Image: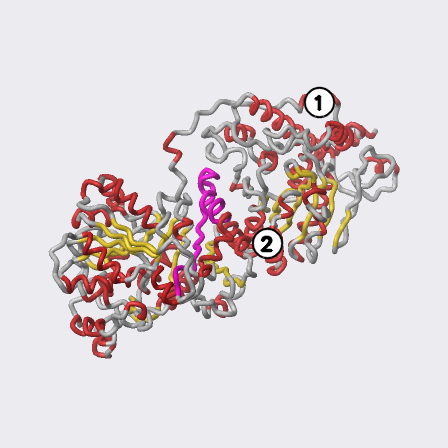
């Protein structure tokens, strides 16, 4: 009976949570709190200068399955990137996001494509959640023309303008003022959209963050600053870098919320709450308590500053994909085998290397972008020497 | 730059009364006149003298077409009589007013243009460039920022990524060093690293250069630091005419443009046309055509050069003075044509000798026009020292007209 209900509701994609007093529906309701019946051990939200949202998260089987699928995809993608890097097909820097997928997926579920997201260099999964294809990801990582930035950006410079994904930035913390600028533009054009500016616990100590926060609070900008706290700034643990590791409180006069970043549903709830708040009251800080399994980047083994036990401990207890998997299985939404099949979706295709002439395109817009420059001038200039 | 055949006697007379080197900026009205008074000598040069609109080349340029109308644009003491002004179109204003006019016209024309900077709104701008704009356009379009250059420049760039056209003012160019990361990495490179997805139509402007005993930190010349950043354009204005034209062109450009103004040039007065005009961002300005030597300069040094040119003319030399205006990229077309004509080049700049605009220009000219040079390129720059406070020391730091005269004489032996 539960099964048939679920099968029907999957196509309806209606919210399962709600007020029915039957124990059955209570058990089916996916809530963020740790009612003794559910498998996940979620934590409540802690808040600073605002009221925390409720721990009960509305969701439905379709969404859960989408979460699972997306996160599994991201996980496989990052692992594939790992092997490609070791095979020297990806060069330079490669910062992997596995372990943190819940943040990207949960955030996307709470917002529209008109809202802007900007992040730092750990951007592969955020790009995918904004609608990027795997082909674009791998092509860009391998420097091919079919990449999202035509092979000219690389791992740290993924952008997708049509879905308002603004990258993709290499310098720690520099994306936060950019994000506040995006929020400013949204306020200027009165869009009723918000900007999520993501940064890490390492970047939280940058001065420009506080500068941008001050301006955003002053001008009431719809900016949501999201600290993805994976507890390590490259090799430095957060307690060695920050006097006050309560990043959600660092905004002082700006309200903040601490969220379990390994729980996609908690992330979704928090982002929804933040969006409503930002549109009415200006900036808010979200701290996502999350963890990365890989090192800071591919050149960092990730084990010199933390123990393997810690990593595997987190993987066992808090892995976001496992949580969703257990949720799904406990509610019999899909079979084990189906889930495994979903996990096999990585495709790599070959795509040509960029032309050498591409080195000089897109340095300036419109070839130096001056309206009144006639074609003659360019030709004459070329024959001078 | 446009020739004038009118009122020359008066302008020359007016000029000679104000020729003391360090005080030449006190008399704001006369400064622009040097550029006019020598074009009377009708040199048979193939570079165009555009007073009557007879243009020999490059007819497409909107800026040049408009120049015909400002044949007598300079307001000199002799020329400001009502009789002479009635025959000239246009209106007189000071350089900072010209900048404001350009900014205001662009803000009216395009609602996406906004201004951000310290004290630009209610205070009216520390050099009055944005005076009155906040009352006219409101607080959302003319934004007073806190003292946080790194972040508000970053915010301007972020806003530009979405299509807004911010004009970011650094109260002094030197303060923009705090925003160097944003300017270099985000402003300059985002168009490239995103594969062309984003354009950054931002304008970053502010006064720089050596002023009157402002001290070392407030007398910096940032064009030499920014010049290597790929993806940005740099222009320097020197007269009210090109200030307004370059401001408008910079705002309309899809590329990030850094507009360098000079603290001491804000009170220059000139008559500019009434109608809408822009100046090409990549074009140099022919200030005085000549035959013997090409003098390349920009911003405030233009006036030192013109002062020296007066002396040189009296000594029998015929210098060709070009205000390069476009610091990145260089207008090698105009410069090249001039080098081919005169075969001698002198660069006069306010940057430091090491790694300045002059250094790059020397390299560019030597690489491209080596065959046409009769003598090595000479470059006169400021001394490689922090600008001292004492007036006399400060004078010795920058290039003075006497040094320019000596250099030309040396070059032309």
In the image, taking residue B413 as reference, residue A94 lies left or right, namely: right
Tell which subunit mark 1 falls on.
A
Q: Could you tell which of marks 2 and 1 lies nearer the N-terminus?
A: 2
Q: Position of residue B54 (x, y in %)?
A: 16, 57
Q: Is residue B248 above or below residue A86?
A: below
Where residue B148 appears, as percent x and y from the top left, is 55, 57
Mark 2 to mark 1 CA distance (whole Å): 46 Å
Residue that numbered label 2 is attached to: A212
Residue at the (23%, 79%) spot, across then down: B81
Here the colouring is secondary structure
- The answer to whether A154 is drawn above or below residue A241 in the figure is above
Q: Is residue B7 above or below residue B257?
A: below
Q: Name the residue located 59 percent from the left edge and 54 percent from the top edge.
A: A212
Residue B146: x and y, percent?
Answer: 56, 61
Residues at discs 2 and 1 both on one chain:
yes
Give x and y (percent) for residue A172. Answer: 58, 43
Determine whether, in the image, residue B331 is placed left or right of residue A105: left
Residue lying at the far bottom of the rendered structure: B82
A278 is within the stretch colored magenta: no
Q: Residue at x 45, y 66 (%)?
A: B130
Q: Nearer the viewer, residue B31 or B135?
A: B31
Quadrant, the N terminus of chain B: bottom left
Q: Say whether residue A313 is visible.
A: yes
Q: Which residue is mark 1?
A: A338
The residue stretch that appears in magenta:
B182-211
Q: A18 or B65: which is nearer to us?
A: B65
Q: Residues within 10 Å of mark 1 (few under 14, many from 20)?
A: few
Q: In screen coordinates, is B140 left or right of B278?
A: right
Residue beneath the point at 67% across and 24% down: A342
Secondary structure found at label 2: helix
Foreground residue, A272 or B156?
B156
Q: Which is nearer the eye, A45 or B232?
A: B232
């Amino acid at each position: 009976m539960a099964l048939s209900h679920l099968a029907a509701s999957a196509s309806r994609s209606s919210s399962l949570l709600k007020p029915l007093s039957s124990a059955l529906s209570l058990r089916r309701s996916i809530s963020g709190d740790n009612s003794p019946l559910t498998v996940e051990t979620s934590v409540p939200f802690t808040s600073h200068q605002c009221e925390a949202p409720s721990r009960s998260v509305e969701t439905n089987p379709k969404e859960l399955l989408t979460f699972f699928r997306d996160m599994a995809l991201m996980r496989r993608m990052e692992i594939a990137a790992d092997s490609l890097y070791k095979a020297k097909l990806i060069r330079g820097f490669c910062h992997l996001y596995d372990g943190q997928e819940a943040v990207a997926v949960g955030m996307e579920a709470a917002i529209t494509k008109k809202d802007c997201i900007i992040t730092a260099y750990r951007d592969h999964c955020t790009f995918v959640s904004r609608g990027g294809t795997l082909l674009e990801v791998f092509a860009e990582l391998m420097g091919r023309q079919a990449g999202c930035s035509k092979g000219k950006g690389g791992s740290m410079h993924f952008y997708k303008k049509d879905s308002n994904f603004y990258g993709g930035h290499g310098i720690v913390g520099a994306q936060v003022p950019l994000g506040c600028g995006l929020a400013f533009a949204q306020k200027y054009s009165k869009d009723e959209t918000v900007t999520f500016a993501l940064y890490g616990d390492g970047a939280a100590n940058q001065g420009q963050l506080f500068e941008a926060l001050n301006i955003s609070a002053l001008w009431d900008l719809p900016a949501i600053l999201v600290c993805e706290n994976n507890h390590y700034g490259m090799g430095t643990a957060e307690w060695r870098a920050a006097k006050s590791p309560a990043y959600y409180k660092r905004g002082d006069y700006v309200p903040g919320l601490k969220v379990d970043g390994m729980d996609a549903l908690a992330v979704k709830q928090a982002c929804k709450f933040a969006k409503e708040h930002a549109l009415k009251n200006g900036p808010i800080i979200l701290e996502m308590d999350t963890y990365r399994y890989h090192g800071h980047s591919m050149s960092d083994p990730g084990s010199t500053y933390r123990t393997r036990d810690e990593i595997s401990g987190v993987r066992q207890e808090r892995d976001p994909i496992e949580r969703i998997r257990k949720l799904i299985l406990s509610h019999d939404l899909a079979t084990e085998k189906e889930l495994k099949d979903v996990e096999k979706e990585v495709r790599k295709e070959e795509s040509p290397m960029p032309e050498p002439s591409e080195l000089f395109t897109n340095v300036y817009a419109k070839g130096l972008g001056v309206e009144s420059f006639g074609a003659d001038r360019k030709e004459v200039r070329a024959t001078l020497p | 730059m446009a020739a004038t055949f009118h009122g020359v006697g008066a302008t020359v007379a007016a000029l000679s009364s104000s020729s003391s080197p360090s005080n030449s900026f006190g008399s704001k009205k006369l400064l622009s006149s040097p550029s006019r008074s020598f074009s009377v000598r009708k040199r048979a040069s193939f570079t165009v003298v555009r007073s009557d609109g007879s243009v020999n080349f490059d007819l497409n340029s909107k800026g040049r077409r408009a120049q015909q109308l400002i044949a007598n644009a300079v307001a000199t003491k002799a020329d400001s009589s009502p009789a002479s002004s009635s025959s000239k179109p246009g209106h007189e204003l000071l350089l900072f007013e010209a900048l404001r006019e350009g900014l205001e016209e662009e803000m009216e024309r395009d609602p996406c243009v906004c201004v951000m900077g310290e004290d630009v709104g209610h205070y009216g701008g520390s050099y009055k460039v944005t005076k009155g704009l906040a009352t006219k356009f409101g607080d959302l379009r003319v934004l007073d920022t806190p003292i946080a250059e790194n972040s508000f420049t970053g915010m301007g760039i972020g806003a530009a990524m979405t299509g807004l056209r911010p004009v970011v003012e650094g109260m002094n160019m030197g303060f923009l060093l705090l925003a160097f990361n944003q300017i270099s990495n985000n402003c300059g490179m985002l168009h490239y690293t995103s594969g062309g997805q984003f354009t950054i139509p931002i304008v970053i402007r502010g006064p720089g250069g050596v002023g009157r005993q402002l001290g070392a930190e407030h007398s910096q010349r940032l064009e030499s630091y920014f010049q290597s950043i790929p993806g940005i354009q740099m222009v320097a204005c020197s007269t009210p005419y090109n200030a307004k034209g370059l401001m408008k062109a910079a705002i309309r450009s899809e590329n990030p443009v850094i507009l360098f103004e000079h603290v001491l040039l804000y009170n220059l007065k000139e008559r500019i046309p009434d109608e809408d005009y822009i100046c090409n961002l990549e074009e140099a300005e022919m200030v005085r055509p000549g035959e013997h030597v090409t003098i390349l300069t920009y911003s405030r040094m233009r006036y030192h050069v013109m002062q020296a040119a007066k002396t040189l003319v009296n000594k029998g030399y015929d210098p060709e003075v070009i205000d390069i205006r476009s610091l990145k990229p260089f207008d090698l077309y105009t410069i090249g044509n001039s080098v081919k004509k005169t075969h001698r080049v002198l660069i006069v700049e306010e940057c430091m000798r090491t790694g300045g605009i002059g250094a790059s220009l020397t390299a560019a000219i030597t690489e491209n026009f080596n065959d046409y040079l009769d003598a090595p390129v000479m470059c006169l720059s400021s001394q490689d020292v922090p600008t001292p406070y004492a007036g006399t020391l400060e004078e010795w730091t920058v290039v003075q007209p006497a040094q320019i005269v000596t250099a030309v004489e040396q070059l032309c032996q």
